Image (cartoon, coloured by chain):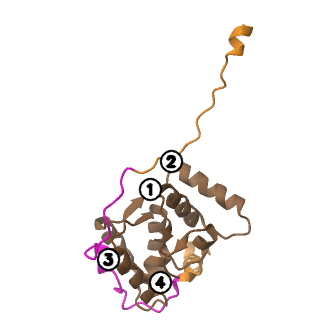
Chain colours: A brown, B orange
Amino acid sequence: MDSSGYLALINPRDIYHQQVVEAASRIARQQWRTYTTNYVIAEAHALFLARLGYQHASAFLRQFERSSAVIVRVGTADDQQAREIIYSYSDKRFSLTDATSGVVMERYRVGVALISDHNFLQYGFAALWL
Amino acid sequence: MRAQAKHAVRVAPRAPRAKRPRTRGRPMTFDDPLFELIGSATDAAPTDSSKKYEYLAEAFANKPECE
C-alpha cells in the first residue's frame, strides 16, 4: 500500500475513501499479507501532517507499530535499483518512493498495489482500486 | 609466471543484492490496529489522494525555511 492509499483510508472525505475501504475489507476478509516500506511511511506521515494535522499523523505512526503489516526497510541495493529505474524511464514520473516500492514488490513477489496514483500502473503492477 | 597468469581470476567486489525477506508477516484481519484508523479524520477537509504529490509540494513550499 502506498501513501495515497493511507490518505484515502483515513479521510472519510477523500474521493476514493469508499473504494479503499472496500479494498481493505477484502484484504482482511481474505487475510492477505500486506507490505509497505519505511519510505512510504515517511511520505504518508508528511502527507498527513500537511492535510490532516499532527494528531492524525501521529496516530498513524502509533497504529503502525502494532499492525500486522510488514514495514520493509529499503536497503542500499533496493535504493540503487530504484534509481536505475528512474534513470531509464525519462518519460515517466516515478518518485524514488514509488520506484523503491516497485523494487520491494518484485523482491517480495507482491503483484497487487493498493493505490490511487497512477505511477504504479506505469511500472506494470496491478492496482486493487483506482 | 605465465602459467600462474593463465589461471588468474579477476576479483571484483560483489554488487550488493537485496535478500529475500525471511519474515512474511501475519495475515491482515479486521482487528488490526490500522482498521481503527479507517475514516478517523472526520475533521479533515476533502482530499483527492491521487494528488499526493501536489499536497506534498504545497506543504513544503509553505515551510518558512523553504522560502
Q: Are marks 3 and 4 in contact (CB under 8 Å)?
A: no
Circle 3: element type:
helix
Magenta span dominant secondary structure:
loop
Residue annotated with mark 1: A73
* Crowding near the residue tagged with mark 1, few <14, some 14–19, many ≥20 C-alpha atoms within 10 Å: few
Q: Amino acid at mark 4?
A: Arg
Looking at this view, is B17 or B59 the one in front?
Answer: B17
Label 1 – label 4 distance at C-alpha: 25 Å
The quadrant the N terminus of chain B occupies is top right
Kind of residue sitting beneath label 1: Arg
Q: Which residue is mark 2?
A: B18
Q: Chain of mark 2?
A: B
Is residue B66 shown to the viewer in this render? no
Q: Amino acid at mark 3?
A: Arg
**Does the magenta run of residues contain B44?**
yes
Tell me, yes or no, if residue B8 can be seen here: yes
Residue B4 appears in which quarter of the rendering?
top right
For disc 3, the marked residue is A29
| Residue shown at the point (71%, 59%) measured from the top left | A88
Label 4: which secondary element = helix
Alpha-carbon span between mark 3 and mark 2? 31 Å
Check chain identity for marks 3 and 4: say if they share one.
Answer: yes
Residue that numbered label 4 is attached to = A51
Disc 2 and disc 1 on one polypeptide chain: no
Which amino acid, mark 2? Ala
Question: Cα distance, mark 2 to mark 1?
Answer: 11 Å
Residue A22 occupies which quadrant of the picture?
bottom left
